[in-house]
Image: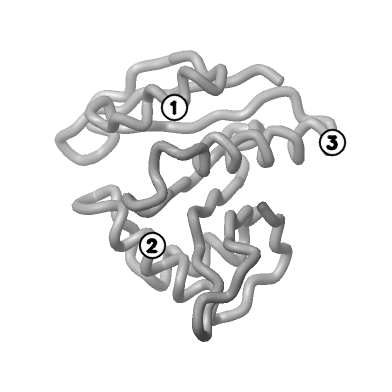
Amino acid sequence: MTFIPAPDENLLTALADISDNCFSGVERPPRDFFKQMARSSKLFVYQSEVTWGPVRPIYGYLLLNEKNGDPYIWSIAVPGNYRGIGCGAGLIREAADYVKENSGSCLTLTVNVNNPAQKLYFNEGFRITAFARNYYGSENGLLMRREL
């Protein structure tokens, strides 16, 4: 896993492709907005150490911002073929370590009530702090927090 302070355009395009494939409807940000957020966020990428042809496969990413003064996971995505093998947990742990090293005391996120990734978040120590009615258009969200 790597913290990337200044992603290049090729990496941003690859991450936007992952976002497009992992999210739909109101949860999928427009590509230009996604790239803008990736440039202005703390970006963590889980990428293969081995090059396959012209590319190094990306196993997932996490974009860390601030919301209401707290470190906030704005987006985390792991392509379907890499789910369930620890990539998402590794990204969360890397972000948590980064926040702790920079004097932070918690991580926050919002998740759709129908998103199975809730199990990952609970397993990684997140707890529900609020219910967000219609946060995702007509679908509800859960605000979650993990103390570090």
Disc 3/disc 2 C-alpha distance (Å)? 28 Å
* Left or right, 14 with reference to 21: right
The vertical placement of 77 against 126, above or below, is below
Q: Name which residue type carries label 3.
A: Glu
Disc 3/disc 1 C-alpha distance (Å)? 23 Å
Rendered location of residue 78, percent (x, y): 42, 49
Q: Do the residues labelled 1 and 2 touch (CB within 8 Å)?
A: no
Mark 1 closeness class: few <14, some 14–19, many ≥20 residues within 10 Å: some
- For the residues carrying marks 3 and 1, which lies nearer the camera in this image? 1
Residue at label 2? 18
Dot placed on the residue nearer the N-terminal end, 3 or 1: 3
Rendered location of residue 67, percent (x, y): 57, 37
Q: Name which residue type carries label 2.
A: Ile
The tag on residue 101 is: 3
Q: Which residue is drawn at 29% across and 60% down?
A: 21
Rendered location of residue 95, percent (x, y): 66, 40
Quadrant the C terminus occupies: top right
Disc 1/disc 2 C-alpha distance (Å)? 19 Å
Between 37 and 76, the residue placed more toward the observer is 76
The tag on residue 120 is: 1
Dot placed on the residue nearer the N-terminal end, 3 or 2: 2
Q: Which residue is drawn at 33% across and 66% down?
A: 30
Element assignment for label 3: helix
Element assignment for label 1: helix
Q: Which residue is drawn at 36% across and 23% down?
A: 142
* Left or right, 100 with reference to 89: right
Q: Name which residue type carries label 1.
A: Leu
Mark 3 closeness class: few <14, some 14–19, many ≥20 residues within 10 Å: few
- For the residues carrying marks 3 and 2, which lies nearer the camera in this image? 2
The tag on residue 68 is: none
Between 56 and 95, the residue placed more toward the observer is 56
Q: Residue at x 70, y 62 (%)?
A: 4
